[in-house]
Amino acid sequence: MVAAAARLSNPHPLDDLSPSEISQAAEYIREAYPNAHINFRVITLSEPPKAVLEPYLRTERSGFKSSAPAKPARMAYVQYYVNTPQDFREVHVDLDKRELLNKNVLKGVHSFSVSSDMEKIEKACIESPEVKEVIDELLLPEGSTVVAETWTYATDGENDMKNKIVMCYMYMRPGSHLDTNYYAYPLDFCVEMSGDGKVLNIIALPLGIDGKMKPAKGNLKPFDRKKIHTGSEYHPDIQTEKRTTVTPYNVVQPQGPSFRTQGQLLTWEKWRLRVGFNYREGMVLHDVSYDGRQLFYRLSLAEMFVPYGDSRSPYPRKAAFDLGNDGAGVNANNLKLGCDCLGHIKYFDGYHHTTSGDPIKLPNVICCHEQDDGILWKHMNTRTKNPVTTRSRVLVLQSIITVTNYEYIFAFYLNQAAEISYEVRATGILSTVPTGPSNAAQPYGTVVAPGVLAPYHQHLFCLRIDTALDGPRNSFATEETYPLPLGCPSGRNAKGVGYTTRQQFVEHEAALDVDIGAGRVFKVINEGVTNPVNGGPVGFKIVPHYSQMLLAHPTSHHAVRSEFAAHPFWVTRYADGERHPAGQHTMQSERGSGIATWLRNRPKKLGVRNEDIVVWHTFGATHNPRIEEWPVMPVEKMMVTLKPVNFFSRNPAVDVPISNQEQNQSVLVEDSRDGRCYKSKL
Amino acid sequence: MVAAAARLSNPHPLDDLSPSEISQAAEYIREAYPNAHINFRVITLSEPPKAVLEPYLRTERSGFKSSAPAKPARMAYVQYYVNTPQDFREVHVDLDKRELLNKNVLKGVHSFSVSSDMEKIEKACIESPEVKEVIDELLLPEGSTVVAETWTYATDGENDMKNKIVMCYMYMRPGSHLDTNYYAYPLDFCVEMSGDGKVLNIIALPLGIDGKMKPAKGNLKPFDRKKIHTGSEYHPDIQTEKRTTVTPYNVVQPQGPSFRTQGQLLTWEKWRLRVGFNYREGMVLHDVSYDGRQLFYRLSLAEMFVPYGDSRSPYPRKAAFDLGNDGAGVNANNLKLGCDCLGHIKYFDGYHHTTSGDPIKLPNVICCHEQDDGILWKHMNTRTKNPVTTRSRVLVLQSIITVTNYEYIFAFYLNQAAEISYEVRATGILSTVPTGPSNAAQPYGTVVAPGVLAPYHQHLFCLRIDTALDGPRNSFATEETYPLPLGCPSGRNAKGVGYTTRQQFVEHEAALDVDIGAGRVFKVINEGVTNPVNGGPVGFKIVPHYSQMLLAHPTSHHAVRSEFAAHPFWVTRYADGERHPAGQHTMQSERGSGIATWLRNRPKKLGVRNEDIVVWHTFGATHNPRIEEWPVMPVEKMMVTLKPVNFFSRNPAVDVPISNQEQNQSVLVEDSRDGRCYKSKL
C-alpha cells in the first residue's frame, strides 16, 4: 500500500492511474454508497475514446503546432461489489468532475480472480473438517504439508454458472523447505469450493484411462511412499546438482543506454511510444511511431487461453483465461536487477489497489533495456574486399507473469529497421495430476516422475494490433505467391520457372487462416499513401507464429468461450469496447461474448477497407510435455514480427553506424593450453 | 599462400587437411602426371568412411578404454584438370602411403566455380571489342565504370550443358568511389561467355512484360541520365545519413569465456563436438554429444538453391546453387573482431589452395563466442514469493559467406538445455535488373530505385542431420495431435475437450510434408533406448522453419536440378557418398542426381527403422523484396531447432546456476532529466 500522494498536476491522457487517482476514484464511489461495504475489484484507467484521443495525439505528435483539441478527461473504470458478490457493478468515474457515469449492474457475470479471495478459499479448503478427514485417510508421510491450489472453474456444463465455483487441486509438500516442488506430489483428490469458501464436493481424481467422476470418500488409497523421489526439485537450496562451468557475462554501456524515458514516454532510435500497464493486459504500447510516422495506435496481448486436453472428469474444468480470469497485470513479477534482465535496465512500476480501494504499488513490472542482436546488415564488395557491417541493437520491453504453476515472459523487441516483434516465452512448472503406476493415462499426457502426469494442453495467445499506418484508416490484405502456368500467357513462362504474387484486400470483417503452401502473407496497408519510389501503397506485414488452433470440439464449452482461438487472424472494425476477444467477462463465461459473436451480431457486415481496423493474431503452442520440461521448463519461445513493406523509401537502418572494434571492445580468445581459454595478448 | 609447414605429427581423423597435407596431395598428383599441367579444383579432406570412423570415435569418447580400433588413414579428395577443363578428374590420395586411389574421369560434369576463373572471364568480357562497342552505344556518364558480374549458368535448355557457359550481367558504377553500389545501375544488356572467356552472345535484357530473347545490337537505348539518384548507397563513405544515437555496448567476461578449444575439438557446458570446415559446406559439426551421450554424427548445411521467378529470358538462367556451384567454404568471410561478433571471440581458420595446388589460409572463417539469451527458466512459488531465475547462455558458431551480391550468415546455437538451433540470416544486396520507366515488369519483382527491379526469387536451404541418438541406429517418426471424437470411446470425451497424439514411424526412405493443422511434429527416435522415468523411447524433435517449397514447375530445369527443394523433410539410409541433395556436381547439371533420384534408383525400398539414417530439412524464404531491403538488406532470419524429447530424465539445464546481480553486474537506469538516461546512484 502506498500513501496517496498529491495528484499529478498534468497527467498525459494515456498515463496509468496514479495512486492518488485510484484513491480518488474509490473515495467518490464510497461516497455514493454511504451505508454499504464496497469491495473494489477493478480500478483502472478508462482510456479516452479513440474519437477524442486520436486527434489529441495527432496534435501532440506535431508539437501542438495546430490549435490543440481539448485534453480528454481523466476517467477511471471501476468494478465493485456492493455488500456482496451478488451485487456486482461497474461505473466510469470522471476524476476531474467527481462524476459517476454509465453506472451499470453486471448481471450474470463474475469478477476476475482476486488473489486475496483465492487465498481465503485455499485456507477454508485446508481447514475444512471434511477435507481433513480425506487427508487423514491418505496416511501421508510425517512432516509433510498439504497444499491446496485454487483454479478458476472452466465451465463444463455441470454447474450453473450463476454460482461462483473454485476448484482446489491438492498437493503434498514433503519435508520442511517451503520451496520444495509440491507439483511432484499431486494427491488423488480435488475439492470443489463455492465462491464464499464452502466445500461443495470432494472428488477422487482418475488414475487410469476411465474418466467418470467419483467421490473421494471410499475411493482413495493411502499415499504410496514409493512415489517419494529425488530429481523433481528446482530451487537451488534443494536441487543438488550445480554447474560450475558458466563464467560471468556482463553487459557494459559506458555512455549509458541509447533510450530515453520521461514518465511513460519512451524514445529510442527513431521510435517513440508510450508504455502503459493495466491490471488485465499488463504491458501495453500506445501511439507507436517511427521516424515521425505513425504505425500503431495500440499493441497489446488481448487474451490467452490454456485449455487442457485431458477429457477425464473433472479435468474439462481446467482451462484458464490467464488475462480475463487472472490478469497479466496483477500477476506481473517484481523484476530484479541481474536476474530478469542484463545490462542497463530501466524499470516501470504499475499501480493496483486493495479490495478496500487503497492503492498498491506493483514495483518493476516492466523492464526496458537494450540488447545486441548480432548482425543487422552486412555487405562485402567482392571487388574491393571491403566489408561493411552493422550490428543490430534492439530495445526490449519485458514483463513476466506468474499464473500459479506457469511463468510467461512477454516482450516487445523494437529494432533499428522499424521492425517490431512480440515474443512469448513459456516457462515455470507443468501443471500435474496423479496417475496410476501402470502409466495407463499416457494418452492424456506425459509421465514426468513416479505417479505424476503432465497432461497435454494448449497455450493460445491473441495479440491485438490496433493499426494506424500513416493515420487511422488502413486496410488488410493477403498476398499469395503462385507459379505462373507453364507457357502462359503468350509464351512468357516457357521455361516453367516463373511465379508472381496475387494481393487480395479483405473487404469485410472476417477470420482468416494461414496457408504456407500458398506462401500467404498478411499485410496491413494504407491505400491512401503511395510509396514515392515504386508507387505502391505503404504497408506492414505480420509474420505469424504458425500454430495449431484450438483442438476442442467446436460445440464444446472451451470452443464457444474462446472464440478467438479458432483462427489465426481476425480483422475487425475498431470499436472502443472491443478489446477482449473472448469477451469482457471470461470468468465462468458460457458462450457468445467473443470476437466471433461481435461479428455475428453486427446489424450488417462492416467493411474494413480504408477504415479504422484492428487485426488480431492468435498463436501459441500445442503443449504435449517433454520430460525435459520437468521439474521446471526451459523457455518455449513463440514470436510474431511486424515488418514494413514498401512503407519507407529504403532500408530505414541504412544509417546505422558501422560496427568497429573501437566501439565494441571485443576480446580475442586463443586456443586452450591448460584447459582454459585465454585472452590474447593482442 | 602459406609456407608448407611440417605435417602435424598426429592429426585427428576429422581434422581438416593441414597446409602441408594439401601440398603433399598436390605433389603426389603432379608426380603422377610428370608432363601435364595440373589445374587443381578441389583438395579437401576425404572424411573416413563411417564404418571405419564411427567405431574409432566411439572408442575415443570412452577415453580409449577398450582396445582402440586402427586409426583411419589420412586421405585427401582431389578434383583436377589435366591440361584442359575437358579432361576433368577426381582421385583419393592416401597421404601416408602416397597412393592415388579410385581414380576417375569426371565425364559430363563441370567443376565448381573458382573465383580466379571468374575474374578472368569478367576481364575478358569487359575488354572484348564487341562488348565495348555496345557499351559505347549507351553513352554512359563520364567517369563511370562498367562492371561485369559473372553468374554461373542455370541450365535452361538453350545451351548444351557440355559447354561451360558463364553469364555476365552488366552494371555501371558512377563516380570514383570503388564501393559505390553498382547494383543501383543495372545496364540493359548481358553477355553470354564461354568457359574459356569468349563472347558468345550479347543479349538485350527485357524492360517490359515481354520476355523474348533479343540481341543487344540495335535494341538498346542510350543510358537515361534521369536514373542517376541518391539513396542507394550503403558504404559509410558515400551514404550520408548517419545515426548518432546508438551508444556503445560491450560484452565483458572477466573470467574469460566458458568454452574450451583444442584444435578443432570444442567443449562447452556438457557439449563436446568437432568444428570442421571444407570448401563446399563451410562449417560442419562432427561427433556432437551432450553430457557424454552421442547426439549427431554430423550436422551441415548440405545445399542451397536460389532460383529467380522472373520468367523472361534470359532470367531463367538465374538460379544459383551457392554450395555446389560456388562453395560456402571458399566464399567464407574473414571475420573481424568487433564487427561480426561481440564479446570474447575464438576464431577458426580454414585452408584452401590455388589452382597450382599451393595451400591458402582462409583466416577467421568461423567465430565462436557466447551470448546471453535472456531467461532460460524461471519459477516463483506464489506462496513463498521466492523467484528462482536462470539466464540462458548460448554458444554461437558463426560463418558468413558472400556470394556476389548476397551475404548469408550461418550459425549454430547450442544452449544449456541440450537444444541446438541452426539459423540462417540473409543480408547483402538484392540482385537487380533494369526495368522500363512504366514499371511494367512489376509482376516479376519490386521496383527499388528508378529503373531498378529486384526480382522475386526463393532461397531454399537443406540442413543435413546425420543423427546418432545414443548410437548410430535411429528411426524417424511423425507425431500428430488430434481431437478425440465427441463422446468416444465409452463416453470418455463427453465434454468434447479431449485430444491425444498419434505417433507413426516412417518405415522406408521417403519425403514428408509439414501439416500445421494436424500439429505434425518430426522426431528422430532411438527405439532401443528407454527413458528410465516414463518408459518411452528416447528422441529429439526437429522444429522446422515453415516455408513455401520450390515454386518452379515440376518439369522445369529448376525443379529437376534441385530435387531436395520439393519437400521440407526427407529421410534416407546413410551412405558415405550421399552428402549433396542436389547431386555432387551441380554446375550446369541437367537432372537426376539429387535426393529423389537416389531413392528412385535403389534396387529396392530401403527401410529406415532402427537403421543408420539421415534426415534432411529443406527450408527457406520466398523472397519477394520489400523496398526496405534496399540498398542493403536488414537480416531476414530463419531458424530450425533440435530439442530433446524424453531423451533425458528431466530438464538437463536444471543445474544451471541461479542468476544474481553479483555475477551479472547490471546497472539501474533512472528516468531522463536533461534528456538522457542516468545510471542510478544505487
Image (tube, coloured by chain):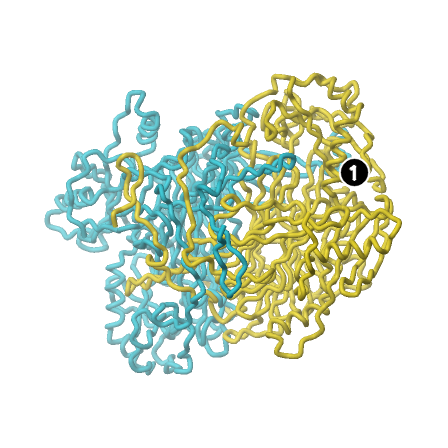
Chain colours: A cyan, B yellow
Which residue lies at the image location 72% right of the left edge and 35% below the top edge?
B150
Q: Is residue A445 visible in this depiction of the protein?
A: no
Q: Nearer the viewer, residue B536 or B515?
A: B536
Q: Is residue B215 left or right of residue B615?
A: right
Outermost right residue = B35
Residue tagged 1: B156
One can see residue A72 in this view: yes
- The location of residue A78, given as percent across then percent down, is 24, 45
What is the three-letter code of the residue carrying label 1? Asp
Using the rendered view, name the quadrant where residue B13 is placed.
bottom right
> Can you say whether B325 is above or below A611 in the image?
below
User: Disc 1 on helix, strand or loop?
Assistant: loop
Q: Residues within 10 Å of mark 1 (few under 14, many from 20)?
A: many
Apparent side of residue A468 relative to residue B525 in the rendered image (left or right)? left
| Residue A160 left/right relative to B153 | left
Identify which residue is drawn at 64% across, 72% down. Answer: B58
**Tag 1 subunit:** B
Nearer to me, A667 or A41: A667
Query: Residue A296 at what x, y percent from top left?
Result: 41, 35
Q: Position of residue B627 (x, y in %)?
A: 55, 31
B125 and B597: which one is in front? B125
Q: Position of residue A332 (x, y in %)?
A: 32, 53
